Amino acid sequence: MLRYTLKRLLSLLISLAIASLVIFATIEVAPGDPAFFMLGINAQEDTLAALRVELGLDKSKPQRYWAWITGMIHGDFGTSYQYRTPISGMISARLWVSLPLALYALVISVLIAFPVGIYAATKRGKKGDLIVMGATQFGLAIPNFWFAMMLVLIFAINLRWFSAGGFTSWDKGVFSALKSLTLPALALALPQAAILARVMRSALLDVLSEDFIRTARAKGLSRRQTLQYHGLRNAMIPVLTILGLQLSFLLAGGIIIEQVFYLPGLGRLIFQSISARDLIVVESVTMLLVFAVIIINFIIDLAYAIVDPRLRARS
Amino acid sequence: MNKSLFTGILLSALIMLAAIVSFAWTPFDHTSLNIPNKLQAPNGTHWLGTDHFGRDMFSMIMVGARTSITVAFVAVGIGLGLGVPLGLWATARQGGWTDEIIMRGNDLIFAFPSLVIAILITAVFGPGAVNAIIAIGIFNIPVFARVTRGGALQLWTREFILAARVAGKGAIRISIEHILPNLANLLIVQATIQFSLGILAEAALSYVGLGAQPPTPSWGRMLADAQTLVSIAPHMALVPGFSIILTVLGLNLLGDGLRDLLDPKLQQVQK
C-alpha cells in the first residue's frame, strides 16, 4: 500500500508541475502588456516601467514562474491587475459558491442515478429498462446550459418557485442559500445522472452474471439480499471511478452554469477576468481548478486500492 | 438493422443534409436583419420563427449546423491524426520508455479539466472557430491514443502478427498493414462518440462567446442570444436546443448501433 501511495504521489507531483508549466506558458504568450492595460493609452513611459517593476513583470520568465508557484504553495495567488487586491481573497469568497454547487449537484446526481440504474438492471430487457435507457440517451444529449435555461423558464419565470439567478449568501441562512443553488445544481446534475445511471446499470449487470451471485441465490438469499450484499458492493468500483470523474467535471462544468444563473462563483470570476484581460486571475483560478481535479483523481486512485486489494498487489 | 442504428443514421443524415444544402440554399438570407418581423413564433413564412433581429431561425440553424459539424469534424480529425499514430507507436514499443512517456502524457491530458483548458486557450489566443477546434481537438488525442493502444495490445499477441514478423516485416509495417485495419471498427465507433461530444463542446464554447464569431451563426451563440428573451420568445431557446439534442442523440445512437453491428462479441452478450 505504501509503495502504491508513493508511486501515485510522485505522478501527482509530476502532473501538477507540468500542468502549472502549461498554464504559465499559455498565459505568457498572450498578447498585451498588463501594465499598459491597467494604466490606459495616456500613461507615461516611466509610470509604466514603475508599475511593471511593482507587478514583477521586469523579471525573467523562470523567475516569475518560480515566484508564482512558490506563492501559490503559501496561499498567495498573486494580485489582480484589475482590482489591485490579493487574488486569494477573491477566490475564497467564490469557492463558497462553486464548491457547494458541485457537491450539491453530485448528491442530486447520485440520488437520481443509483435508484434508476439499479431499477433498470433488475428489470433488464423489460419495458422499465427500455424506458430508463431511452431517457438516459436523451439525458446524455442535453447540453446542461440549455437545460438550465429551460429550468429557469419553467420554475423561475412561469411557476415562480425559485429566483431566475443570483445567489443568496450563506449568512442569510443555509436554506435560502441552498435554494438559490437548487436550479443550477439540478441543471448540472441531470446530464451527469444519465451517465451515472448507465454505468450503475451495466456494472450491476456485469456482477449479476457472476457465479457467486448464483451461489448466493442457491444458498437461500432472496433476490433483494443478493443484490444488497453481493451485487451492489461489487458494482461500486466502476461506479466510484465515474463518481470521481463527475466531481471534477461538476466543478469545472459549473463555470458555464454559473454564467446562466449569474452566480458569483469561480466560473464568473474567470469570465469577468477574461473580458477585463486580468490574465493573472485567469491563470491562478485555472491552476486552482486543475489542482482540484488532479487531487480528486489522486484520492479516487487511493480509494480503489482500499476497496480493491488486488490493485495494491499489482503495483 | 437494429432500431438505434436506424434512428441514428436518420438523425445524423438529416443534420448533414441541412448543413450541405445550406451551401446552396436557405429559405432566407441568414444575415439579413428584418427588425419589424422580430421574435415571430414559428409560422408559415418563417418555419422556425425569427430571432430578436428578425433573422430567419431555420436558415440560421442550417448554417449553424455547418459550424457545429465542421468544428467537431476537424477536432475528431486532430484526435485521429495524432492519437492513432501515438497509440500504434506506443504499442509497437510496448513496455519501453516511449510507451511509458506516451501513456503518461495521455494520462496528464486526461487529468486536465478539458472545458477549463479549452476556455483558457480560446480566451488567450482569441475567440474563434479555429481556436475552438484546437482546444477541443487536443483532448481528443489521448482518447484515440488509448483506444488504439488498448485494441492493438491484444492484436499484437495474435498468430497472424507473429506470422508477419516471421515474414520479416518491421513494427511500422505491421502496425500500418495489419494492426490498423483491424482497429478500424473500434476507431469508427469512438470517432462517432467524440464527434457528438465535440458538438456539445462547441455549443458550450460558443455559448460563452468563445466559439465562432458573428456573423457566422452557431447553435451555442443562438442560445446565448435567447437567454434574456426566453420568457417572451421561448422558441429562440427551444429551436437551437433541440437541434443540438437531436444531433447529439443521433450520433450517440449511431455509435451504439455501429458498435453492436461491428462487434459480433457484443451481440451475443447484449446488455
Image: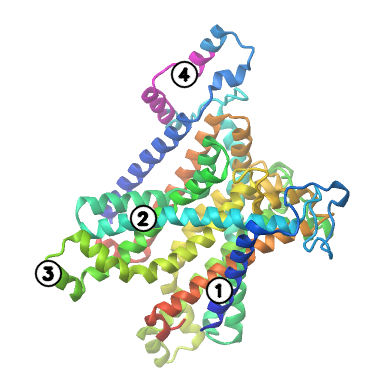
Q: Is residue B136 visible?
A: yes
**Label at residue B167:** 3
Q: Position of residue A101 (x, y in %)?
A: 62, 51
- Dots 3 and 2 on the same chain: yes
User: Which element type, helix, strand or loop, lies under badge 2?
Assistant: helix
Left or right: where does residue B25 sit relative to residue A247? right
Q: Position of residue B15 (x, y in %)?
A: 61, 65
What residue is shown with label 2?
A: B83
**Parent chain of label 4:** A
The disc labelled 3 sits on which kind of residue? Ala
**Residue at the limit of the structure toward the right, as seen here:** B36
Q: In the picture shown, does residue A240 fall above or below A264? A: below
The disc labelled 1 sits on which kind of residue? Ile
Mark 3, mark 2: which one is toward the viewer? 3
- Dots 1 and 4 on the same chain: no
The disc labelled 4 sits on which kind of residue? Gly
Q: Nearer the viewer, residue A211 or B77?
A: B77
- Dots 3 and 4 on the same chain: no
The disc labelled 2 sits on which kind of residue? Gly
What residue is shown with label 1?
A: B9
Q: Residues within 10 Å of mark 3 (few under 14, many from 20)?
A: few
Left or right: where does residue B251 sit relative to residue A186? left
Q: Position of residue B249 (x, y in %)?
A: 59, 68
Q: Residues within 10 Å of mark 2 (few under 14, many from 20)?
A: many
Left or right: where does residue B213 sit relative to residue A34? right
Q: CA distance from mark 3 to mark 2?
A: 28 Å
**Label at residue A56:** 4
Give the magenta range: A51-70
Q: Residue at x 82, y 55 (%)?
A: B231
Q: Residue at x 25, y 60 (%)?
A: B91
Q: In the picture shown, does residue A204 fall above or below A265? A: below
